[in-house]
Amino acid sequence: MNKNFEPHEAQLDQAEFNLLYRNYHEFEILDHLYNAAMDELCMRLNVLNEEFAVMYERSPIHHIESRVKSTRSIVAKLRRKGVPVTLQSARQNINDLAGIRVVCCYIDDVYAVEEMLMRQKDIELVKRQDYIAQPNYNGYRSLHLDMRVPIHLSDRTEHVMVEIQLRSVAMDFWASLEHDLRYKMEEGALPIGLDEEMLSCANEIAAIDIRMQEMYKRITGMKPKEKTDELIREIG
């Protein structure tokens, strides 16, 4: 069972659960499929990370997190989009039913992991949003990749959509705390000036992120991007 699905959720939101699933078995099928897609991509990411650790004594990936959206979150997102609240609609209209967050050590590592992942020809890139090059209005920074990954089942192959978020440790620090602060307040009830203060903190943390990468460059005697390119060439 998906670790994010708790039995009491179906009891508390039985009507919403029934909008998506005709029965519990249908939920299990979807849950298995999207967990399998996450497992597949996490395995590939771990293989790449472990190869770096063996060959170059450093790991570009700090840690990986994953989750499948809860029933409540799926229903809420479908309603926000103004589309039918059905299982078919969820698969067609929500790209992050399965989500993976890849937290990297440095900014250049984010793009290095993206490049290595995209060289795997059986993965299809559907959508790319670079909030590092162009931060969101509130200062949020991350690289989002919506990807289809093949899942080989007993009688067929399914191509399942997964959203991958790649970010540095510093970006993850800000995003995690910003989320915690924002969702402690009711919608629309943020104190005056807090949005501006969050944006200021995001910019300060981004500046520190760049400084840490520059220190890495000084230690290695090579620009991080140059080192990344060299490692990718050697692996390829």
Image (tube, grey):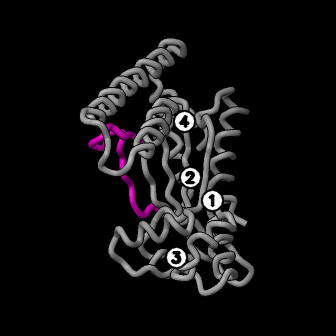
**Residue 138 location in percent, x, y?**
30, 40
Q: Is residue 135 magenta?
A: yes
User: Which mark identifies residue 113?
Assistant: none
Does residue 187 appear left or right of residue 89 in this picture? left
User: Which mark identifies residue 100?
Assistant: 2
Q: Which residue corresponds to the image point at 38% horizontal and 49% vertical from the top-left?
A: 186
- Lower sequence index among marks 3 and 4: 3
* Label 2: which secondary element: strand
Q: Nearer the viewer, mark 3 or mark 2?
A: 3
| Crowd rating for badge 1 (residues with CA inside 10 Å; few <14, some 14–19, many 20+) | many
Residue position for label 1: 38
- Lower sequence index among marks 1 and 2: 1
Q: Which residue corresponds to the image point at 58% horizontal and 82% vertical from the top-left?
A: 21
Does the CB distance between marks 1 and 2 fall below 8 Å? yes
**Residue 58 location in percent, x, y?**
65, 28
Q: Nearer the viewer, mark 3 or mark 4?
A: 3
| Measured Cα–Cα span from mark 4 to mark 1 | 18 Å
